[in-house]
Image (cartoon, helix red, strand yellow):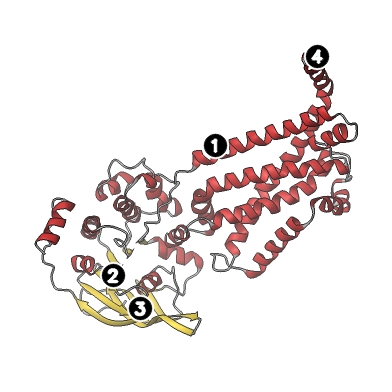
Amino acid sequence: MVDAVREYIVRVIEFWPALFESLWETGIMMGFAMIAAILLGLPLGTLLYLTAKGKPMENIYIYQLSNFFVNIVRSFPFLLLVVAMQPFIRAVYGRATGDPVAASFPMMLIAIALYARFVQQSLLDVPRGVTETAHSMGASRLQLVWKFLFVESRSSLIIGFTTAFVSFISYSTIMGVVGGGGIGDFAIRYGYQRYETDIMYTAIIVIIIIVQIIQWLGLKLAKKVDKR
Amino acid sequence: MVTDGPGVFRLINMNSVTKTYQGKNGPFNAVDKVSLKVEENEIFGLIGESGAGKSTLLRFINALESPTEGYVSVDDTDVFNLSRKQLRQHQKGIGMIFQQFNLLNNKSVRENIQLPLELHKYEKPLTVEEVLAFVGLPDKADNYPSQLSGGEKQRVGIARALITRPKILLCDEPTSALDESTTEEIVDVLKRAHEAFDMTILVVTHELNVIKRMCRRCAVLEKGRLIDIIDIAPKTRKQSYKSYHDRVLKVLKNG
């Protein structure tokens, strides 16, 4: 038993540089996905909310267009989205395979669509009276969003972001297919293709720990800012 | 300027306003050809049963609702003929309080009250301390709405409306979510506000006692139509009770 543990530790140390590198690659993909979710997903979700029927900026064309985009991206099987985007990534970034930045493009697209949906849901949960109050005070649209809607939905926005983050990790494990690397790719290469099961489980446990920490942090933050 | 003899200034003017909704059984009028004038500085009541159209009528004044037909003017401004920017300026001068208080639950009492000042520049706003003292909650500035009772929340709602020194205060069922003695307190705060800060108040309610205690005139609405405008008999000072228990004894025992 003691020998087995010692042998396992030695193997983990041996694989540590490769494991660390794949974590770094995952980090790059996650970073791009999160930035895209905040910079583009948040405004898109807000637009979905504002332009819907009966809302302050009702506009059927913008609403349908945004809605269509989100539905298309989300209904695309992710692996096929990755493959289908190859020519586009090559045109924009120069290469489509073999590095985590190239692999981040489909991650960003799914992140925008997924988080936009969460944001829309969060805003729909804000009581009608909040919008009415903003309107009665003569708030501009920007003020309505910043000073009323986001304030009242902030904990729900954070929980949505946490949920989206966990999904991004799951999506990122596919990116080995196009040479994007990452922790999922690491698990497949060593565990599945080379039968080094212990290393695969180690990778999976690392993923689970990351997810747990993020989930815990997200809920804690959401609770802290929730004064309702 | 629309005047009726010296000293009487018609501040709010509604002319044949109608609001039509497309219902299941064809169109119906939530507000039906109502014409109404409210004088500067009066407390005017709008009463009727639920669905009578009184809240809709109130919301024409600050354009939260728009009529299908008819004309609404405030201070000679045609409310439904304004650019978006002009409309915001119009709304800036009108305070509103709501049945469900509509406070932002993630903001403290202080932040809630300051909110209107963050949206526009006002010439001579009051301070948070002044309005909180006025509504009788001087030590609640750092609380959150979830820590307050219904009556306290409405006081914060009133404070938030008063801080801008509005020329018009719209009250939509201000006491309908409150019990009887809290209702009286809120009515008192509103009456004091009327005396202290030169303004016109419109009150929508189905509670006749609130109207009797506050208003000199009120309009009666039924199924969207204006049935009558009543001059209210001068109030007989209502007895105030020391406690809820006293009131229960008075009402239940002495009938």
| Dot label at residue B206 | 2
The reply to whether residue B202 is visible in this rendering is: yes
Name the element at disc 2: loop
Residue type at mark 2 is His
Q: Kindly state the secondary structure of the residue where label 3 is placed.
A: strand
Badge 4 sits on which subunit? A
Q: Residues within 10 Å of mark 3 (few under 14, many from 20)?
A: many
| Amino acid carrying mark 3 in the image | Met
Whether A7 is drawn above or below A199: the answer is above
**Residue type of the residue flagged with mark 4:** Asp
Name the residue nearer the viewer: A204 or A72. Answer: A204
Q: Residues within 10 Å of mark 4 (few under 14, many from 20)?
A: few
- Picture disc at residue B14: 3
B248 w.r.t. B64: above or below? above
In front of the other: B173 or B39: B173
Determine the secondary structure under disc 1. helix
Which chain is mark 3 on? B
Q: Is residue B186 left or right of residue A176?
A: left
Residue under label 1: A220
Q: Number of numbered discs present? A: 4
Residue at 40% across, 44% down: B108
Residue B177, image quadrant: bottom left
Q: Secondary structure at mark 4?
A: helix
Chain letter behind tag 2:
B
Residue at label 4? A3
Residue at mark 4 shares a chain with residue at mark 2: no
CB within 8 Å, label 1 to label 3: no
